[in-house]
Each structure stands twice: as C-alpha cells, then as structure tokens.
Amino acid sequence: MSLQPWIQQLSQLLPLDSSELEQILAYNSSLPKEEATKHLGDLLGDTPESAAFIAAFNSREGDPNGGATHQADIKNAQAVQPPPSAPADHEKRHHITGTPSDAAPGDSKVGDSALPPAYAPPVFAPPPGPHPGSGLADRRNHTNAVIEAARVRARDEQEMQQALMNLQYEYGIYNSDIEPEHESDYPCSCPIHRYQAMKWRRYGVQDMWSKAVRYPGEHSYNDNINNSIFTRNPYKFQVVSPFGYGFQRQWTYGATVRPNPGYHARSIHQTIDLNNSLNKEAQSNIDGKEPKHSIWNDDAVELAMSKLSMNEKSNGDRKGSVANGKDEKGALRDEKASVRPALNSVASQSSAADQPKSSRLSSFRKSIGIKTSDERFVAKAEKAGTQGKSLRDQIVSEENGRWPDEQWRYIVANYQEKVGMTTMIAELRTRKPTQYLHLLRAGYFEPIPVAWAAQASNPLKFSIEAAAGWRGITPAWRGYEDTAEERLYWVLNHRVGSVGMRMKPDFISEMNMARDRMAKAVEPPPSYFDAQDTCHLQHTSEGYSKQVMPAPFRAYDRPETASDDTMVLLDVSGSMDFDPVRPIYEQYLITRWTRSTQPKNKDVAKAIIRRFTDAMANHDHQSAGYDLTTFSDRASYIGTINHKNLDHMWRGVRLGGGTRVMTGWQKVKELHFQKHSESATYHPIYGWQAGPSTPMLRLLLLLDGEATDMDEFELDLLGLSWAHVTIFLIGVDGCPHHHRHANELQRISDVNHHVSFVDAQGNCPERFVTHELLKRHLGYDISMREFEGMEELPAYTE
C-alpha cells in the first residue's frame, strides 16, 4: 500500500521532510499494533487530530485523505508572531529606565503614570505550591517563539534524560557525557537502537527549538547518522568517538562496545578545543551583525536623507555655474561630502569604489537603471533604518508583553538591581539590540517564575549538547551542561564588578582542580575530637579522614539579629541511604566503583542537625526549635525540631528519589512568608516579594552531592537580599566528584556573599563541622570558648 497519502496527512501534524515522514511511517508499520499506537502517540501528542490519524493509519481503513484539519502544536508554535508594534513613544513609556529607588510598590505614581495597587498577599499564607503543569505561568498571557518551543520541548525532555541515564546504567557507562554505541548502524530491537529511535523522533522538536533560539546567519544541525556527507554538524568529523574505531574498539559479549580511555581523553580534548573555537566565532559573527547605528534614534538617518535630496534637487540649477572659484563638480563633491558622515553612521562602511565619482556616462547609466554610488549608499541607509525600526518594534512589543504594567516592571527592575545587571542590560539594549532581544525572549532579565520549581522540566532544565545540535540561548552556548548553567555564567559575566570573562571551567580543568583540592586535605585539629561522633559509634574506621580546611572566616554578610528566621533544609534523595562509594578513574573514564569505609550520609546529616540546633538553641534561647523541610523529587515539611523531639520527628523522614533542591527551596520560602506575610507582597508569576521590614531567612542546607537544579537555585539566590544560605556538603573520602562540587560552591560563594558553605569527606569531625557552620550561619567569628558554651545541652522548659 502506498504511503504517500498518509505522508501528506502526517505532514499536517508533523513539520518534517517527506523522506523523514516516510521513514517514520515505515518504521511504525513494522511494529505490533499496540507499540505502533504508543509510538505515534508519543510523537504526535494527544490531540484529537493526532488520535484520529493514529486510529486511521493503524487500521488502514478510513479515508487516507481525511482526518486532521488543524496543525499540531509544533507548527502552531513556529507560526507565532510578535504582537503589533508599539506607538512611537515606546522607549519613554515601556522600557525599564528607572531603578527601584525611583518608585515603590506602594507609590501611587511613577512619573506621570498612575500605578495600580500593589499585589496584596493572598487571603491564605503561604499559597499552596503550584501543581506541576498547572499553567500558572500562562497567566501572563504572553508568548513568543522561544516560549512555544520550550513548551513543546518540555513535554518529553525529562523522559529523554532519564532514558539516557537508564541506558548508561544498563551498559555500565558511568560518565554522563558518553552515549552508548552499537557496533553496527543497522537498526535492531536492542536498547541502544530504541533510544536512538526516540532521539530520531524528536528531530522535529529539535528543529523547532533551534529556529527559536539561533541567531541571524546561524544554521541548525543534528547528530543523525544518515546525514554523514552533507551534514552541517562540525563535530561529525572533528571529534573522535570515545569508543575508538575499528580494531581499537573494545568488544564485549552481546555485540556492545566499551569506551576506550585513550580515545575518551582525545574526544574530550577535541571537544573542548572545538567548543572554544566555535564560541569565539559565533560571538564575533553576531557582534558584527549588530546595527552600526542606534536603533533608538532616527535623527541621523532623516537628516542625512533630507540633505542628500536637497543636494540632488539643486544639482540641476548649478549646471554651468562656478561658486567660490570651484567648478560645479567640485562644489557638488563638497556638498555630498558633508552628507556622507551622517550616512556613515547608518550604513556599513563602503569600499573605496562606492565613493562618489563624476562620470560622463552618469546620465546614460541612470537611464538604463544603474544606480549611482550615492543612490546605492542611500539604499543601504534606508535598509539599515528599516531593519533598525523593525528590531526596535520587536523589542518594545516583547517588553510590553513580558512586563504589562508598572508593578511588573518595578519587580523586574528591582531584580536587575539586586543581581547587579542594571547597567549592563541597559548597555546591551542600546549597543547590541539583536542579542538583547534574544535574551529578552528567553527571560534572562527577570526573576525565575515560581511555577518552574514544581515542573519536572522547564526552560532552565534543558540539556545543551553541542555535538548533537541541541542549542543554548547565548551565542557562546557550547560547553555548558544545561540552560541553567549557561544563564548562571552569563549573569556572573554581566554583573557590576565583573572583571573579564568568568568562564566555566572545562571538564579537564574541573578534574585537575578537584584533584589539586583533594591533595590539600590534612588531619583535622585534634581539639575537636569527640568519641560520640557517628564514625566512632559505628566503628567504620580508626580516626578521622583528612579534611580540606576552609579558608579563615571573613564576615561578608551582616551578622544575625534577633528577628532572623532560622530553618533547616535536608536532602533526602536515594543517595543519602546508599553505601558510600567512590569512582575509580582511568585517565578521565570511570571504570568502576569501590566502597568507602564511612557512615551513610543520612547518619552524618542527622548528627550535624542535632549538634547545630542544640547550639542555636543555646545561642538564641529558641527552645521551641527550628523548622525542618526535606526534599528529593518533591518537598515535605517535617515540623519544628528540637533536642527533645528530633528522634521522633526523624521517623517522618522518607528517603528516596532524585535531588531537586528548588522544590525544597520553594517550600522553605512559603513557610518563611507564612510567618511574615504582612511585610511582603505576592506576585502571580514571580511569587513572594520581600519588603523592607521582612526578616532575613537564615537557612542551613545539607546536601550529599550536586542537585540536578543547583544552577537554578544559585541563580535564584543572586536576586535575593533577604536570605542567607549556609550549605553543608557531605562527601565520600577521596572522591573527585565531591571536590568538583565543592569548587563550584566556592566560586558561587565568592561572588554571592549571601551563600557560604562547609564540606566534609569520609569520617568527619562533627564538632569541627558544626563550629564552622555556626560561624557562617550567624555571620561572625565564634571563638572556641563561645562554641564550647553553645555545645552545652539547652535548658528546655515545659
């Protein structure tokens, strides 16, 4: 049976080439009916039109020319156009030109514009956490190509990431950057080819995402093995496979291959070099395509055009005349020369051949339609002016859609000021409007929507895979793991006080720095010995593990006050209950894991929480205790803990799941503003906004590894001045992964003084850890004598 009628119908639902659609249908025809239905359902979604097509195709009954009459979500999203352009006074009325000091939410006016009343807190406090997929962000009623592409991509992004992790685990591959390979390219039913089929079915989504985020002049590509000759993928022939080639490939039973340590190292080096080269080239290209004149000022263009028109009109009146001892050609050259500097500010620089020259054939050339150099120059100026106006209108329309009222713009301006990007963003808007528009559409200049924290996948959780063609947002996107990490480093490079480019260390640099840090570990001070430490009670080994000593304490943030609110946030992911293991490397390839003789992370965490809360109770005489919240894939409020009830409350702690710190962070913020809602306001998209009198939240966060959304968490903290977070990182003795994460936390704490951290590995001295945590949590250097006094059991009253 011919597939052509079905291909035409499927093209209405999936915007791919006919050859790719034919392959999809041919593959689907080879599957059992149930699998075929699921395959097409995953690919097309659950719209009525998709269901009708799937039923008709799998039954091979019904009219192949009938069926769907509407486009699928992908095609709809690609057709999204920006709203109509704004009036001419756009810059004065819609751009965020003032800082938060210009107005406050409670003010009645900003300049001459009346402000709507401030968003009042909800009648309940805190608001319930947004349900995943609840569509809270849709209340903005604004969309663009990036937003629509992100919605489509988010549907199965988490599923694809989990499928890759499962595949790596099944084939014993422990490096997250290595995708298992088959020894042959012909398809079979093995897990590797099933995963590759899942990737293949997403090429339409990938193309849609690429079109939404790529810059002018850039091209999309993917890692389709069938496009080996005419591919645009620069990694195809410039980066070696980590598995090697031919006889170098390490075979195992079952027709699978193992990564080769030597080829893996070569692959990493080649990828890093190519990333740097392509990033530099891409940034240079887009900088060169920025308008040569200010798109916010049309005066230079209009003046130059009017003067040139007057010169041409008066040219005929001056024929045969001589002015000031110059002939007509000389006079005309002088007048045109006075016009050209203005045009030079609009059009790109022309070659010497474009300069005005007198010619006896000028009349003849004009009669046959050949433009003079001035006419070509004017055409360039008009084109540049038209493009500038179009770019300006797109920016203004996007700003109006994203920030629809003064209250909204106040929150955004306040965020930009707190992060330290106000000046940089204003300069980017003026001098690099093309890049400004791309970042504006991706939400780079505003707080993170609260709804994203509860979503399994959001625009800050998208993977960036340079070799596979999954792009980021900025021009220099290659080398980042995901869109959150990319945005974090973009912010760090564009804050006030940034010196040079703060580049993300590449994998090799990270590993080298981790090993250097690990080599600095020394024996902990003997004065902190305690026979009641967990490692001694469980007899895991003799003595303590060597520890990396923290730098001498320096107070950057303000010290604790009586009104500050202390809470505890605990990671309860599955790894907290695992037997501690560390990786064994061959060059940069993890070949196996080995057991470490130390307590489980959950036991260390409980001991530190007990010591910390007891010391805090002696310090601030808060006998009731402190709120404890746990998180993994979701957050749970355990209750208020103190020395008396900790063992009882600990029974409510459930271990298992992933590590999504943003779910716990949102729960902690809700609890904090529940207590202090009278001093804050609530925004439907950005959530709670602290007021001048809102007490500071002081949070102790306990982690045993890097959370999947750690970069998103660090981004959120950059824009907050009412929270101080002290992180305790629990690690396996001699594990490079632990020290890589510790180095990352050190880089963040260096630029954000509201974040500090302490780490410990192996069999740790709990008193030493607690002392260092208290210094950073309370914001002052606690002497040993004072610390020993805080260690005494607190006096609780009934």
Image (cartoon, rainbow, N blue to C red):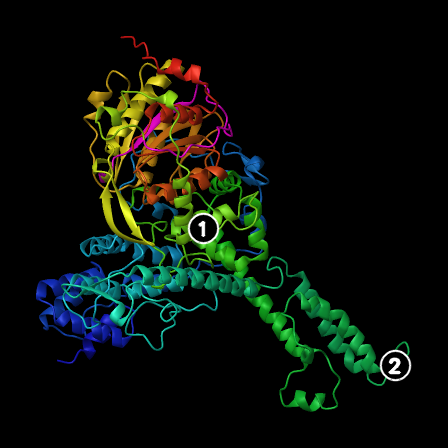
Q: Position of residue 581 (x, y in %)?
A: 24, 41
Prevailing secondary structure class for the magenta stretch in the rendered image: loop
- Where is residue 744 drawn, in percent x and y? 41, 43
Label 2 secondary element: loop
Q: Which image quarter holds the N terminus?
A: bottom left
The magenta stretch spans residue 570: yes
Q: Is residue 51 left or right of residue 696?
A: left
Q: Which residue is mark 2?
A: 322
Disc 1 from disc 2: Cα separation: 67 Å
Three-letter code for the amino acid on which mark 2 is drawn: Val
**Residue at 36% in and 63% down:** 467
Q: Position of residue 636 (x, y in %)?
A: 25, 32
As shown in the figure, which amino acid type bears the numbered disc 1?
Lys
For label 1, the crowd category at 10 Å Cα-Cα, with few meaning under 14, some 14 to 19 and many 20 or more, is some
Q: Is residue 229 above or below residue 304?
A: below
Residue drawn where x is 59% and y is 40% of the image: 111
Q: Nearer the viewer, residue 105 or 341?
A: 341
Check disc 2: other Cα within 10 Å, few if <14, some if 14-19, many if 20+: few
Q: Which residue is mark 1?
A: 504
- Between 552 and 416, which is closer to the camera in this rendering? 552
Give the answer, above or below, for where 783 lies relative to 488.
above
Residue in the picture at 49% in, 27% down: 692
Decide if residue 456 is in sight here.
no
* Count of number-bearing discs: 2
Along the polypeptide, which appears first: circle 1 or circle 2?
2
In the figure, residue 319 lies in which quadrant? bottom right
Q: Is residue 484 visible?
A: yes
Nearer to us of marks 1 and 2 is 1
- The magenta span reads 545-574
Left or right: residue 632 compared with residue 271: left
